[in-house]
Amino acid sequence: MRITFLGTGAGNSSRRAHSAIAVECPDGTNLLLDASSGNSALRHAAAAGIDVRKFDNVLLSHDHPDHMSGIDFIQFDRAWSGEDRGPLRVHASYEAMEGLKRHCIATRLNIWDISGDYGRNYEGREFLHWNPAAPGHVIELGPKTTAWHFPADHITGASGWRVESDGKTIVFSGDTRYSPELVAAAQGVDLLIHEAFCVADVTLARAAGHCTGGEAGQAAAETSAASLAITHLTDAYHADSQPLGTEAAEHYAGPITLAEDLLKITL
Amino acid sequence: MNELEIIFLGTGAGLSTMRAHTAIALRCPDGTLLLLDGSSGNSALRNGEIAGIKSYDYDHVLLSHDHQDHLSGLMFVQGNRSREIPDENPLSIYGSSLALNGLRKAAVAGKVPDIRDGAAYNHAGKQVMRWEEIRPGRRLELGPQTVAWNFGVDHIPGSIGWRIETGGLSVVFSGDTTYSRGLVDAAQGADLLIHEALTTDDEHDRAESRLHSTSGDAARVAGQASVKQLIITHIDNAFHENQAPLLQDAARIYTGPINAAHDLMQVTVPIP
């Protein structure tokens, strides 16, 4: 399983692309965890040698624009590719899916009709397939790849995702405060990808709907994750993210990776 | 300062997967800093940061039209600006009524908490963006020695180009458009014309069907308006690596200096 970080910046980052992670599974299933904003996921995928047009599934953590508005350009690129790969399948909680639909009809980038199960262009052609799911509902994404989401503690409808493929398991926190639901869902994972907003000031992090590096480490320890990657970095930690890792290591003894744009992890 | 500085923050066409979408910073001789279009995502912010421009440095934003690759990045410029300077410091945006309507709809869907009377407010009730519809031909005072006005171009409804005059210099930005007579009139004698081009003249029909220009069209406008310099932007993936076909196509028609923009390219125009 190959994981490529296409965007690792927090919502106000002026240094990094917004959140998006490409996951290439051993059974040939390709999926995106979040979609970044603008054409950032497309540009970083091109730079990493990844063809996003071969990614048939996007798993959304929540409907903040820095995590989902890049879907506009991902489906637009796919629409103009000249190949018919079918509509891009989007998976999210019911609440986040409604937010995405509102976004698509407001921006009208190729999508003019959001009724029913599909986002369609002005000719009625289907380019996005809405797949809202309840927490815990197992989605078959490929012959040996499944995913399900669990509630995160951020905004209404925010989720984290657990992806399992051919014996390997990753969990992506999305944006969240320290979350017992995440700890329950991430038991024994090979890789926990967790956000962190700052160090030391738990109150500040909680007020922003996020967590500290220490809390990310605590979650990794409580789940017995085999490894931890920290992402969603603000500008304050762009040049030197080590304080987040150092604080996480006070709680978690396993290997810690501090993500940056275009970083690859192979499991 | 005795020069005008142009910093290309984004030079990619809507379908570009290699470049940031359209945004151009103009540092005027009187110190006024303008942003022409807002790119998408946080691309204008990221390339601005590399070029030494902060979100809170911009005095005004001039929008060309209601397409997401030209305006959706403004929300992130505003978000960063409000975080860096929590005092009331709204981003000032000018555009056509249709472009501002698109911006407003995207802001609502983007969870901006309060939008009314030509402005957006954050959770603390502070004004973070304000916008004003500017009709073609109306002169806008943007700085002590900087004025701008816009003119209709031929793309989607509500599409405009901008002419900026500052310290005795004039820059014209086409926005997105097919070959436009109105642009030829508005660009007369400009020191610099920044014009879009999707492809070369041999694919004129394809460019026109997508409501865009060819490099030949850009050169025709430059020649007919007798501008002193032409820069081609809004570059598609096909010309990302090699812009020579665009430049050669334009050079058949326009004999002045021609350049093709790339992300983070900086151009200075000295005051004569």
Image (cartoon, grey):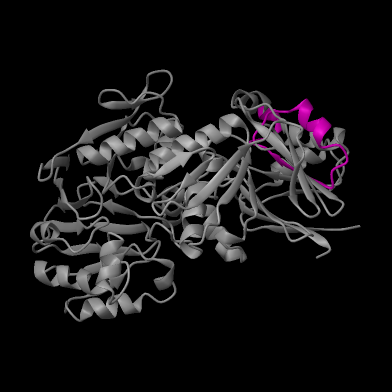
Tell me what residue is drawn at x 74 percent, y 28 percent: B180
State the image coordinates of residue A240 (x, y, percent, origin top left): 41, 77
Q: Quadrant of the N terminus of chain B?
A: bottom right
State the image coordinates of residue B10 (x, y, percent, origin top left): 59, 50
Q: Is residue B180 magenta?
A: yes
Q: Can residue A89 be seen in this view?
A: no
* Side of B171 relative to A176 (left or right): right
Q: In which quarter of the image is the C terminus of chain B?
A: bottom right
Tell me what residue is drawn at x 36 percent, y 65 percent: A233
State the image quarter where residue A225 is shown: bottom left
* Side of B252 relative to B105 (left or right): right
State the image coordinates of residue B200 (x, y, percent, origin top left): 69, 34
> Is B2 drawn above or below residue B73 in the view shown?
below
Q: Is residue B248 visible?
A: yes
State the extent of the magenta-drawn residues as a range.
Answer: B176-203
* Side of A193 relative to B70 (left or right): left
Q: Which of A187 and A14 is in front in this view?
A: A14
> Is B56 drawn above or below residue A255 in the view shown?
above
Q: Which residue lies furthest to the right in this view?
A: B272
* Side of A131 relative to B201 (left or right): left
State the image coordinates of residue B113 (x, y, percent, origin top left): 39, 45
Q: Is residue B215 magenta?
A: no
Q: Nearer the viewer, residue B240 or A113?
A: A113
Q: Which of B203 and A181 is in front in this view?
A: A181
State the image quarter where residue A79 is shown: top left
